[in-house]
């Protein structure tokens, strides 16, 4: 088949540091190519893949209305002129990109990696359309009440070639927080848990440029970083991530929001590292309590779980990850639609 993959400009595909969706898009392009399909990637500046890449838009997440409209018009022009050349159009970008070809016969999958705006889906679904399927990266997203159209849940995945399995870690291996340092990600809970269990905590990730999130980091997190028990190492690249996750006692997902998926959980499990999480969003779908991690409702409950983390079989953690979150499996799941 000839496949067109679409992603929003702003972060290149693949990303150097932060960019979970961009990693997914890149690896899908590679897997589709490995499976014998002809792939074209439509993405932002600096993007590339094994197939053909067409770059558009600006490498800027804070776009003006004029820039955003210009990107939409570019995709519209491209799809109107070229949709008949493709058997399958797979979009991780804005839903509005697909507007000119909604009722064209080409097969279309619109994939969501975050919460969905119900009204936008309703508006699109009321228009004449055919061969359009929506997917969410978890059942939490795909089964949201009131969503019009056909929806399927297909998990996110990791490239297992980039993650080394670690069968056993040292007794003083740290707990790890890895993600954007927004307040809803719960880094403050992770620090509290580290102090209650007398464990080292390594914090990795980027600080948001949004004023209220920057204030959260500077006023809540930064004063608690002592560079000994509580350490902040900044953003990490793929190699650093592999080292960090593989040598961790556990990855912490003590969230104050409903995470749509949380690809870092699958990345940790690829290393054999269990995950400790609050039951929010897709955590309940990824973490099997007492098997590849633990789920608890409070930081205080998590203390006991940290103390019995050695009961988790790291071989089993990796095995489950390979069964559920391999890029080969997920690429085939999308194609099966």
Image (cartoon, grey):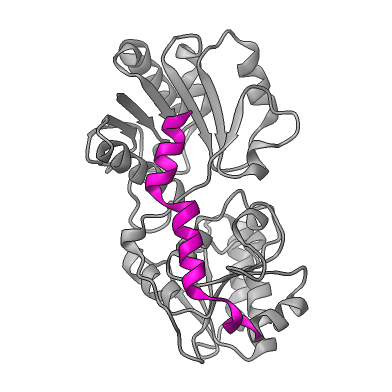
Q: Where is 201 relative to 179, above or below?
A: below
Residue ID at (35%, 33%)? 57
Residue ID at (40%, 17%)? 76
Magenta segment, prevailing SS (helix, strand or loop): helix
Q: Position of residue 133 (x, y in %)?
A: 54, 24
Q: Where is 34 relative to 318, above or below?
A: above
Residue ID at (51%, 83%)? 174
Q: Position of residue 22 (x, y in %)?
A: 40, 46
Callout count: 0
**256 left or right of 318?**
right
In terms of image quadrants, where is residue 161? bottom left
Q: Is residue 321 magenta?
A: yes
Q: Where is 124 relative to 186, above or below?
A: above
The answer to whether one can see residue 162 in this image is yes
Q: Where is 29 relative to 94, above or below?
A: below
Residue ID at (65%, 18%)? 123
**303 left or right of 330?**
right
**223 left or right of 32?**
right
Q: Position of residue 88 (x, y in %)?
A: 38, 23
The answer to whether one can see residue 67 in this image is no
Q: Work out which quarter of the rendered image holds the N terminus and state it.
A: top left
- Magenta region, residue range: 308-337
Between residues 310 and 111, which one lies in front from this camera angle?
A: 310
Between residues 99 and 51, which one lies in front from this camera angle?
A: 51
Q: Is residue 225 magenta?
A: no
Between residues 155 and 176, which one lies in front from this camera angle?
A: 155
Q: Position of residue 23 (x, y in %)?
A: 39, 49
């Amino acid at each position: 088949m000839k496949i067109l993959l679409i992603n929003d400009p702003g972060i290149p595909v693949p990303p150097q540091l932060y960019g979970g969706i961009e990693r997914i898009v890149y690896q899908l392009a590679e897997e589709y190519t490995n499976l014998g399909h002809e792939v074209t990637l439509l993405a932002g500046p600096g993007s590339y893949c094994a197939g053909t890449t067409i770059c558009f838009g600006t490498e800027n997440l804070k776009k003006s209305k004029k820039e955003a409209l210009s990107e939409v018009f570019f995709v519209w022009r491209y799809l109107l002129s070229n949709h008949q050349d493709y058997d399958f159009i797979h979009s991780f970008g804005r839903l509005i990109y697909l507007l000119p070809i909604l009722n064209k016969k080409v097969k279309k999958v619109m994939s969501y990696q975050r919460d969905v705006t119900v009204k936008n889906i309703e508006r699109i679904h009321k228009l004449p359309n055919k061969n359009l399927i929506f997917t969410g990266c978890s059942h939490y997203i795909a089964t949201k009440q009131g969503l019009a159209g056909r929806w399927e849940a297909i998990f996110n995945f990791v490239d297992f070639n980039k993650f080394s399995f670690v069968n056993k870690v040292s007794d003083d291996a740290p707990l790890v927080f890895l993600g954007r340092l927004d307040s809803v990600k719960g880094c403050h809970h992770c620090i509290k848990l580290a102090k209650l269990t007398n464990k080292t905590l390594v914090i990795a990730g980027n600080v948001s440029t949004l004023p209220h999130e920057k204030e959260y980091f500077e006023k809540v997190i930064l004063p608690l970083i002592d560079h000994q028990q509580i350490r902040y190492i900044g953003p990490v690249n793929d190699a650093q991530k592999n080292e960090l996750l593989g040598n961790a006692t556990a990855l912490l997902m003590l969230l104050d929001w409903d995470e749509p998926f949380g690809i870092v959980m699958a990345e940790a499990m690829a290393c054999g590292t269990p995950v400790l999480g609050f039951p929010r969003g897709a955590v309940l779908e990824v973490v099997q309590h007492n098997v590849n991690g633990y789920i608890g409702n409070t930081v205080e409950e998590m203390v006991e779980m940290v103390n019995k983390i050695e009961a988790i079989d790291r071989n089993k953690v990796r095995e489950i990850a390979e069964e559920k979150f391999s890029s080969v499996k997920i690429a085939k799941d999308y194609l099966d639609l």
